Amino acid sequence: MSQRTVQSRHRRAWRASSRRVDLRAHNIAQAEFVADRYGIDNARFQVRDADEIVNDETWDVVFNLGLLYHVLNPFHLIKQTYELCRSFAVIDTVCHTEPCPLSSSW
């Protein structure tokens, strides 16, 4: 792969739009600071509960990072992630060996 191809792919990646949703306003403020600092103007940030995301948009890639073990219904969130993505879903979480106190209600 030539250097020109790498640069061209890198430039295209920055043209993509993105949206970050987080329940903590502090995390959104940090993301906005970084975007502003690096001149990233194609990203939107929202303080919002993941359960309130409306499936009115679909995305090429959906990242669901470190979230599943925080929600009461992780299977619903996985389904929602699937519905939001056109191509790829990246899911990262932690698995515990101890039973969850809520597991009996699933």
Image (spheres, grey):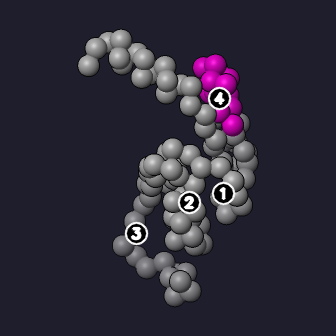
Amino acid type at image mark 4: Asn
Q: Is mark 3 on a helix, strand or loop?
A: loop
Amino acid type at image mark 3: His
Instruction: Look at the image and say whether residue 25 sits in the magenta stretch.
Output: no
Mark before the other along the chain sequence, 3 or 2: 2
Looking at the image, which residue is at 67% across and 25% down? 41
Q: Which mark is residue 96?
A: 3
Q: Name the residue under label 2.
A: 83
Q: Give the range drawn in magenta.
A: 32-44
Q: Is 103 located above or below residue 3 in the figure?
A: below
Outermost residue toward the top in this view:
4
CB within 8 Å, label 2 to label 1: yes
Outermost residue toward the bottom in this view:
104
Cα distance between the residues tagged 2 and 4: 22 Å
Looking at the image, which residue is at 70% across and 58% down? 54
Closer-to-camera residue (45/82):
82
Cα distance between the residues tagged 3 and 4: 37 Å
State the quadrant of the N terminus. Answer: top left
Mark nearer the viewer, 4 or 1: 1
Q: Which mark is residue 42?
A: 4
Q: Mark 1 points at which residue?
A: 55
Q: Where is residue 102? Give x, y as percent.
A: 55, 81
Looking at the image, which residue is at 56% across and 86% down? 105
Instruction: Look at the image and say whether residue 41 sits in the magenta stretch.
Output: yes
Determine which quarter of the picture holds residue 99.
Answer: bottom left
Mark nearer the viewer, 3 or 2: 2
Q: What element carries label 1?
A: loop
Looking at the image, which residue is at 48% across and 78% down? 100
